[in-house]
Amino acid sequence: MDVRKHYKMFKKGKKWCCMALTTVAVAAGTLMATQTANADNVSLSTTSEAASTSSESFSISSVASDSTTAADENVASQASDSSTESATSAVNQSKATVSQSTAENANSQAAIASTVNDSASAANALEPAKSAESSSAQSAASNMVKPSEASSDINSVASSAEADAEVATMTSLAATTQKKGLVTENGNTYYYQNGQQLKNGFTTINGKTYYFKADGTMVKDYFYQNWGHTYYFQKDGSRLDDGFYTNWGHTYYFGDGGVRLDDGFYQNWGHTYYFGDGGVRLDNGFYQNWGHTYYFGDGGVRLDDGFYTNWGHTYYFQKDGSRLDNGFYTNWGNVYYFGNDGVRLDNSFYTNWGKVYYFGADGARATNATINLGFGNLTFDGNGVLSDSNSFIGSIVNGAIRGWTQYKILPSLTLAQAILESGWGKSTLASQYHNLFGIKGSYNGQSVTMATAEFIGGRYITVNAAFRAYPDNDASVADHSLFFIQNSRYSNLIGVTDSNTATYLVRADGYATDPSYTTSLRNMISTYNLTRFDQVAFRL
């Protein structure tokens, strides 16, 4: 048998090793004794593969068993010793290989396991040849390591090697693994970038922003203030962007970028909301700005184009949310008036533009109506202006009431004097020059001279006198009040609320020389219930 060894390089893990490849050539005819005798000189240098060396040892032993010479016995003995040494060397070499592989990956483990399995197969396949005629060969074979024993030892080493390699690999992986992303440790959440813990900084993950404090812990259910703004990080740690937050009985809004809305308006769902100082949403409250008042109701919704009732009053908020102050509102075929404080005028008189109006219990202005409030009938025309069934009284009643509101001259006195002095507005002085009260002198440089009867010396005499000329009856009524104010002798008339007293004082102060003047005035007041207009004036 011709035994030759070939060596081939192969990669194991990160190292190159040599594997002995044994080629057995069988010569035709005879076996070369010299070759057999030199079997003990075969180099078994491939100690890295224990199973391959063991296989060669048993091949040599088989050759020796075919010889009957003493030299053959010696060769068998040597082969036995070589086999034992080779097996021992193989075990030691396997252990060394395993030790080196502790830092290698799973491919190293597969290579070791493959080598061990191949060795075990070779050992199991080799069994010394038996000869009935050669007892020496049997003796030599008995001194050799049995293939089953060698295989058992090698398998044991392989098993141990696999376990050690697995532990070593896991240890190596654990040692080299870096923490990455969100990590929960001891009940806190941290964030790692390239193995480094993020501290006192922000990061965005899946479109959400998180903040980590100086100790690296993620803030949760936490308010953060910086750059003049306030931010809220929710219970999961993510920053609240474009959303509402409710706590302490209040609602807050955090907009784009997570900034809390302070002292600003927010519009959504067709509504307007206001968030005041501290970010608190205004609910059921008034807001004043730009000279206007606004109301924000339940849920913080601003009241637009709607009525609000409270404190026994009704208010109207216009389409832009501003409260209607000192203005009229028209709807449902009616006119409503809201005063300076926004309160709708109910069951009340209102005067403007020198006219008097009345708004009923539902706030609607009285128009083309006659009402009685307990002190006589009051008539209002198609424009809602106070009038009267008597056209002359109706034409001057608003001016008479204005005399009270401006100068505190009693309206019933003014009306009675106008009726008496102008003959219901039909005298020449009244009809042509609108002088309803017979006041002498000039008005804005305008006058007219006319004859008049004066009671002098116990009798009436006719005299010519200059009288004031007015552009209209309304100017005459207004000048009548000024006449009393500008002449100190009539100062006692100012503010008098009783018609009997007023009619007495005006005669006593010298307005007329007719001794029956007071009585005539009182009769007019009583006949036409002129005091009803005093009651209107008192309510303005």
Image (tube, grey):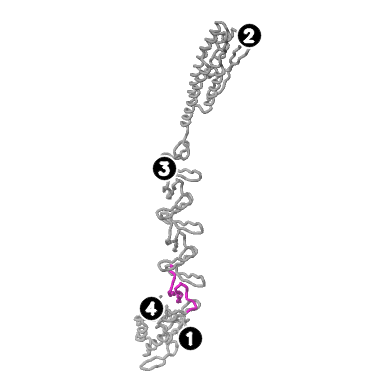
Q: Residues within 10 Å of mark 3 (few under 14, many from 20)?
A: some
* Label 3 with label 1: CB-CB less than 8 Å: no
Would residue 401 be visible to someone looking at this image?
A: yes
Query: Against 283, is 428 above or below?
Result: below
Q: Which residue position is annotated with label 1? A: 431
Of mark 3 and mark 2, the one earlier in the sequence is 2
Q: Which residue position is annotated with label 3? A: 213
Horizontal relation, residue 142 to residue 496: left or right? right
Location of residue 55 (image quadrant): top right
Of mark 1 and mark 2, the one earlier in the sequence is 2
Dot 4 amino acid type: Lys
Dot 1 amino acid type: Ser
> How many angstroms separate mark 2 from mark 4 (CA)?
160 Å
Q: Which residue position is annotated with label 2? A: 30
Q: At 61% across and 12% down in the image, what residue appears?
A: 2
Farthest-out residue, top: 70
Q: Which residue position is annotated with label 4? A: 408
Of mark 2 and mark 4, the one earlier in the sequence is 2
> How many angstroms separate mark 1 from mark 2 (CA)?
171 Å
